[in-house]
Image: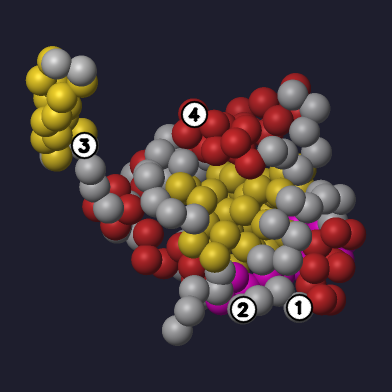
């Protein structure tokens, strides 16, 4: 918690702001840059966020049906809390129905740890960045992945953090 005191005109004002780091909101935050994106396309394709996407990978991304820029959003595990598979799948179906109803085009994608011990069903969706952030916030998501046409980024949703360009520097 941070207490800020200052003057607004002649009036003394005190504000209380809750500040926390991304790691405090989700202990898995440091692992986000190590994600592998597995697109459920024909043929299937995979993007390792630990590497800069190659020209071939970017071309394949464009062939998936989403255009850049796009977001990768999940409804799984809100606020980093592990939910049951049943709850997560229902949340994901609701997200997909919401996107369809709004007319957004998307492709299913799994966001997985390199060893595949953790995967979250997600969607790659052609959407304005602020709309993607708003949806992710509605779903209590810590962050989302953003593809700007050549690079991926981690963009905070409920967590306030500077966007992180991927791959992170060594």
The mark that comes first in sequence, 4 or 1, is: 1
Q: Which residue is mark 2?
A: 51
Number of other residues with Cα within 10 Å of mark 4, as a class: few under 14, some 14 to 19, many 20 or more: few
In magenta segment, residue 42: yes
Crowding near the residue tagged with mark 2, few <14, some 14–19, many ≥20 C-alpha atoms within 10 Å: some
Q: What residue sits right under mark 3 in the picture?
A: 18
Question: Circle 1 sits on which residue?
Answer: 54
Q: Is residue 122 left or right of residue 85?
A: right
Q: Residue at x 69, y 38 (%)?
A: 128
Viewer-nearest residue: 65 or 115? 65
Residue 139 visible, this orientation: no
Residue located at (61% from left, 28% from top): 94
Dot 3 lies on which element? Answer: loop
> Mark 3 or mark 4: which is in front?
3
Q: Residue furthest bottom?
A: 170
Mark 1–mark 2 CB contact (< 8 Å) = yes
- Rendered image: mark on residue 138: 4
Magenta region, mostly helix, strand or loop? loop
Q: Between disc 3 and disc 2, whose residue precedes?
A: 3
């Amino acid at each position: 918690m941070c207490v800020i005191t200052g003057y607004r005109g002649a009036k003394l004002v005190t504000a209380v702001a809750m500040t926390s780091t991304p790691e405090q909101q989700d202990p898995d935050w440091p692992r986000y840059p190590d994600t592998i994106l597995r697109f459920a396309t024909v043929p299937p394709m995979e993007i390792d966020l630990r590497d800069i996407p190659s020209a071939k990978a970017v071309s394949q991304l464009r062939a998936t049906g989403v255009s850049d820029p796009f977001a990768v959003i999940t409804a799984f595990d809100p606020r980093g809390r592990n939910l049951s598979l049943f709850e997560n799948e229902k949340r994901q179906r609701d997200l997909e129905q919401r996107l369809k109803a709004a007319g957004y085009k998307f492709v299913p994608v799994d966001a997985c740890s390199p060893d595949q011990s953790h995967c979250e069903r997600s969607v790659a969706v052609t959407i304005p960045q602020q709309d993607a952030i708003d949806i992710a916030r509605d779903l209590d998501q810590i962050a989302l992945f953003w593809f700007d046409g050549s690079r991926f980024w981690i963009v905070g949703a409920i967590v306030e953090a500077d966007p992180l360009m991927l791959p992170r520097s060594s």
